Image (cartoon, rainbow, N blue to C red):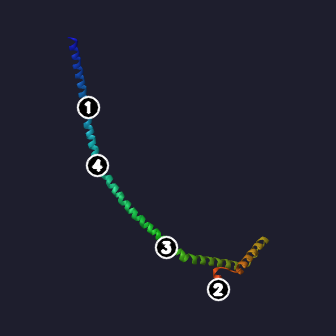
Amino acid sequence: MSVGELAGLLVAVFWAVLVTLLAVVLVRLSKVLREATVLVAAVTEQAVPLLQDANAAVRSAHEQLERVDEITANVQDAAADAKALSSTVAATLGGPLVKMAAFSYGVRKAAARRNAGPTVPQQAGEREELARLIRAEVRAATAPRGGLLARVRRAVRG
């Protein structure tokens, strides 16, 4: 055998091994592709119902949000009505109720003082404070009033 024939034989063996290895790789690649195809089909079969369920859940949530919006609007209207009613009641009954409570408090205090008898402060500091308060009340009661109502009365009297 000559060197040329030996080189040809080596190249032929090399090509035979190379072709065999490529055939093995292609067989394994075809198995991987088949498994990938099966996996994609399984995922598709499971994903489509999940997407449909998700779509139904989103629609249901949207309907519930619309209902909540309606309820919120109704609650806002009710709160506004309650506020208007409470302000009306406060304006209508608040003043007279406060006056009546103050009057009943005064009556109770007067009745308690009448039943207890007159009490004069025993300490000099308390007596001076009481005298100062009485003088201030007398000054306030006898002070001339220069308000608008007093001017109108003077103008009407002439």
Q: In terms of secondary structure, where does tag 4 sit?
A: helix
Task: Give coordinates of residue 66: x percent, y percent.
Answer: 37, 62
Tag 3 residue: 85
Cα–Cα gap, marks 1 and 3:
83 Å
Q: In terms of secondary structure, where does tag 3 sit?
A: helix
Q: Pointer 4: residues within 10 angstroms few (<14), some, or many (20+)?
A: few
Tag 1 residue: 28
Cα–Cα gap, marks 3 and 4:
55 Å
* Dot 3 amino acid type: Leu
Q: Pointer 1: residues within 10 angstroms few (<14), some, or many (20+)?
A: few
Mark 3 or mark 2, which has the lower sequence index?
Answer: 3
Mark 4 or mark 1, which has the lower sequence index?
Answer: 1
> As rendered, which of 8 and 152 lies closer to the eye?
152
**Placement of 137 over or under 34, stated as above or below:** below
* Dot 2 amino acid type: Ala
Tag 4 residue: 48
